[in-house]
Image (cartoon, rainbow, N blue to C red):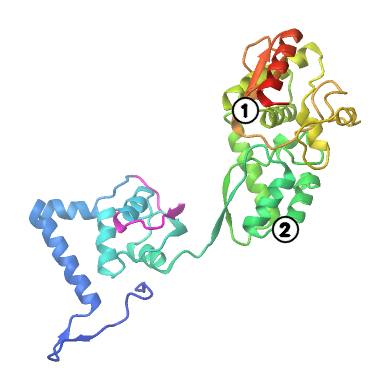
Amino acid sequence: MTTRVEGIDAPEREYGRRGRRRPGRRVRAVIATVVAVGAVIAAVGAGSAWYLLVRPDVAGVAPGQPVSVEIEQGASTAAIAAQLSGAGVVPNANRFRLEARRLGADNQLRAGVYDLETGMTYEEVISLLANGPLITYVTVTIPEGWTIPEVAERVERDTGIAAEEFEALAESGFAEFPRAYLRDVEGSLQGYLFPKTYRVEEGMTAREVINMMLDQFETELAEVDVAAAEARGLSLHELVTLASLIERETRVAQERPLVSSVIHNRLEKGMRLQIDATIEYVLPGTRVRLSYEDLQIDSPYNTYRYAGLPPGPIANPGLASLKAAAAPADTDYIYYVLTGLDGSHTFTVTYEEFLRAKERSREVLGE
């Protein structure tokens, strides 16, 4: 059965001013292909040219394996051919280019994401790419340190999935997402919706998007030294909770292991963490700074009143914060205070040093 490439197989007749019929587009494409092949043969010899058109670019590719290929906007036929042959979708990039020219599809292949297979015929692939992708995706970027409501709003903005539905499922539907690493979670999935840029298929549900984020968390977790955290007496849930504190408290990337060391040191000494971000998590609205009354709120997330980690994560941390939580810097720091306009901190061992740093902070930040 011949695969018809829509829009490029239609018969075409053209006539010159003297009534002679000019070759149609398909005939001209065949002639161009013959000329191109002839040029290759003339340049390197018949045997070598044929070898360049039939040899697989990638050896040992099993047919029928699913492959997702994203064709960038403006990509040339040569670039597309190399991409497809490299993924094993077609055997040979040079042959793909010639077949695209023969079928009149050169420079007519459309950008998009395609779900293909290894070992497809050239005609099948060219037909699909000439007609455009069947599946539409949207890109959703979730920054590090966002909470579930913030994630839900971004998902709604980019995909149309109702934020209310997404948030309700993420806050209380944990039982619907069985994962071994969620064994200590009872309620919210806060902390486990991994921040990343996702390609979300049009028509996906809130449940499917959450599953995607949870799968990504599990993938990223393989890069974290969880054993080191366990050796420090932390469960995975406590590790994620600690990482969320680091994420919300840190704006300078290099300071993550230092902030982590302060938290670990305070936990080991039985000191209260006194982290503003934990109070901000339970207070409505946003604040430039916390008041004395804010520090008195009776909540298990108030680390000024209660020792130890809060009951759960206060945000969704990224990989760098998870790594820092598992492997803090080796310091004796007990305190840190914001002293830089870039969000950097001064770290101190003694309370007296902390007070001096706090005074400098007022001078620099104008508080």
Q: Secondary structure at mark 1?
A: loop
Can I make out residue 278 in this image?
yes
> In the orientation shown, which residue stands out farthest toward the bottom?
19
Classify 314 as above or below 353: below
Residue located at (33% from left, 62% from top): 122
Three-letter code for the amino acid on which mark 1 is drawn: Leu
Callout 1 environment at 10 Å: few (<14), some (14 to 19), or many (20+)?
Answer: few
Residue 79, given in percent of the width and then of the height, sits at: 32, 53
Please tell me whether residue 31 belongs to the stretch shown in magenta. no
The magenta span reads: 60-78
Q: Which residue is mark 1?
A: 341
Disc 2 is placed on an element classified as loop
Q: Residue at x 77, y 28 (%)?
A: 276
Mark toward the start of the polypeptide (2 vs 1): 2
**Whether residue 8 is situated above or below residue 57 in the rendered picture:** below
Mark 2 belongs to which amino acid?
Answer: Ala
Residue name at image x 81 percent, y 41 percent: 187
- Mark 2 or mark 1: which is in front? 1
